[in-house]
Image (tube, helix red, strand yellow):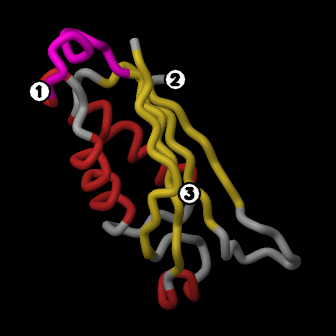
């Protein structure tokens, strides 16, 4: 097993409970940690033997810029499930979604949620 990590993938989307979050939208950041079955990829040095992280990025982008979710927890789970479904070599996906402009009555850097699939 080996791990592919993608850090701080940035997307503009419209998730959240408040109507303003859908209307205005905001930037979201995603980290993906993918545990991958090695098969022959490490020996063959071939893209066909591994998971193409460019294609993973596009898959994440489709989900995060797609339909609105009220919870970033649900968003992270949908991303993790989609990656595991689309890429059979991924044994487990751990997805972190960060929301820097979370509507809270105070100052913070971001709210972050991490979900793993399968659990």
Q: Residue at x 25, y 55 (%)?
A: 58
Q: Is disc 1 surrounded by few (<14), some (14 to 19) or many (20+) residues within 10 Å?
A: few
Q: Nearer the viewer, residue 50 or 101?
A: 50
For marks 1 and 3, give the one nearer the viewer.
1
Q: In the image, 108: left or right of 82?
A: right
Q: Residue at x 40, y 46 (%)?
A: 78
- For residue 119, the mark is 2
Where residue 30 sits in the image (x, y, percent)?
50, 54
Above-or-below relation of 53 to 29: above
Q: Residue at x 45, y 29 (%)?
A: 117
Q: Which residues are magenta?
A: 36-46
Q: In the image, 56: left or right of 34?
A: left
- For residue 103, the mark is none
Q: In the image, 105: left or right of 97?
A: right
Provide the secondary structure element on which disc 2 rests. Answer: loop
Where residue 92 sits in the image (x, y, percent)?
42, 24
Query: Is the residue under label 2 in contact with that under label 1 (CB below 8 Å)?
Result: no
Q: Which residue is mark 3?
A: 72
Above-or-below relation of 72 to 22: above
């Amino acid at each position: 097993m080996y791990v592919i990590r993608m850090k701080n993938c940035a997307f503009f989307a419209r998730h959240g409970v408040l109507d303003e979050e859908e209307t205005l939208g905001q930037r979201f950041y995603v980290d993906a940690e993918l545990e991958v079955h090695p098969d022959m990829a490490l020996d063959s040095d071939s893209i066909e033997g591994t998971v193409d992280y460019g294609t993973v990025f596009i898959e994440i982008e489709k989900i995060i810029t797609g339909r609105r979710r009220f919870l970033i927890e649900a968003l992270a789970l949908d991303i993790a499930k989609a990656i595991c479904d689309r890429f059979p070599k991924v044994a487990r996906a751990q997805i972190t979604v960060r929301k820097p402009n979370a509507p809270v009555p105070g100052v913070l850097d971001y709210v972050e949620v991490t979900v793993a699939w399968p659990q």
